[in-house]
Amino acid sequence: MGLIHTKMLVHYLRHEKYRLLYNINSMRLLILVIVLIDFYYISAQEFTLPEDTEVWNPVPRIVDTFDNLAPSDAIILFDKDSLNNWQKINGNPADWEVKSNIFTIKPGTGDILTKQKFSSVQFHIEWRAPRLSDESGQNRGNSGIFFQERYELQILDSYNNKTYTNGQAGSIYKQFIPLVNASREPYVWQNYDVIFIAPTFNDNGSINTKANMTVFHNGILVQYKVILEGATTYIGKPKYDFHNNGSILLQDHGSKISFRNIWVREIEVP
C-alpha cells in the first residue's frame, strides 16, 4: 500500500470510527485496523534523512598494508632465516633445512608445528614442490597444512599428476574437491591464502558450530566457505572431538617441499 493511499485510509477511518461506536465489536475491529495502519505508516516514515542510516561506531582499527609483504598486524611465522616460531611435536626444535630465506622439509624428521596456538585465522603461505618426474599420485610433492593440528589443506604437485580429486592440491583432504586445479609446474613457487573459521563446542563437548574454510590457490578461489565435517582422517569418515585452540602444523610426508613468507592474522568471529 502506498503512503498516499495509507494517509487517505487513515483519515477516513479516523472519522468513520465515531459513527461505528454504537457497536462494540466494530469498535474493537476499528481500533485494531487503525493501530496496524498507523504502525505501517510510521514504519514507512522511519528513515527520512541520509544520516538516519549512517553508523559511526565502532570504528575499525587501522591495519597498514604493503605490496608483497605481510599486513602490519600479522604474526610472522617465517620470514627469512629462523624456525624459532616452530617446533617438533615432541617439543624439540624444528630441524628442517633453512637456507636462502626458505626452509625445506627434511624427510623422516617428522612434522613441525607453531609454538603459538590459534583459533580462527587468515593465513598466507608460499610453497614449492620438487621435480619428481619418476613419481606420481600422492608420492609427488606431498605435504599438508593442518589448522588446529586437525583440519588439512592438501599440498601436492598436481601439475599433470592424476590422483583422487579430494586429495589433490587445494583440496580439504578427503572432504572437499577444489573448484579448479590452479597448480603450477614443479619447482615454481605457489601460494595459499586461507580463511579458517574454527569450530565451537558446547559445554558438554558436543559440536556447536562446525569449522569452515575458504582457500585461494595462486590467487584463484578453490574453496568457498566449505563446512568441514570433522578432523581429517586417512581412513573412515571425519568427526569432531572437543578441543581448544591449536597449532598450525606442516606435514612431513617424505617430500622435499620448500616454504617461505608465512604469516597469520587472528580473526575475531562474532
Image (spheres, rainbow, N blue to C red):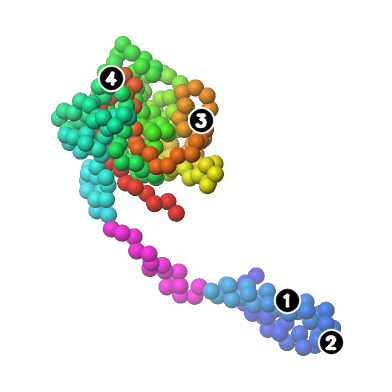
Comparing labels 3 and 1, the label whose residue is closer to the camera: 3
Which residue position holds label 1? 32
Assess whether residue 134 is covered by the magenta stretch: no
Q: Distance from label 2 to label 1 (Cα)?
A: 16 Å
Q: Which of the pair 35/111 is nearer the observer?
A: 111
Residue 39 rendering spot, x and y as whole percentages: 63, 75
**Mark 3 or mark 1: which comes first in sequence?**
1
Q: Distance from label 4 to label 3 (Cα)?
A: 27 Å
The quadrant the C terminus occupies is bottom left
**Mark 4 or mark 2: which comes first in sequence?**
2
Q: Distance from label 3 to label 1 (Cα)?
A: 55 Å
The type of residue carrying mark 2 is Tyr
Residue 262 rendering spot, x and y as whole percentages: 26, 38
Residue 222 rendering spot, x and y as whole percentages: 41, 35
Which residue position holds label 2? 22
Residue 68, label in figure: none
In the image, the segment drawn in magenta is 47-62
Q: Distance from label 4 to label 2 (Cα)?
A: 94 Å
Q: Residues within 10 Å of mark 4 (few under 14, many from 20)?
A: some
Residue 107, label in figure: 4
* Secondary element at tag 1: helix
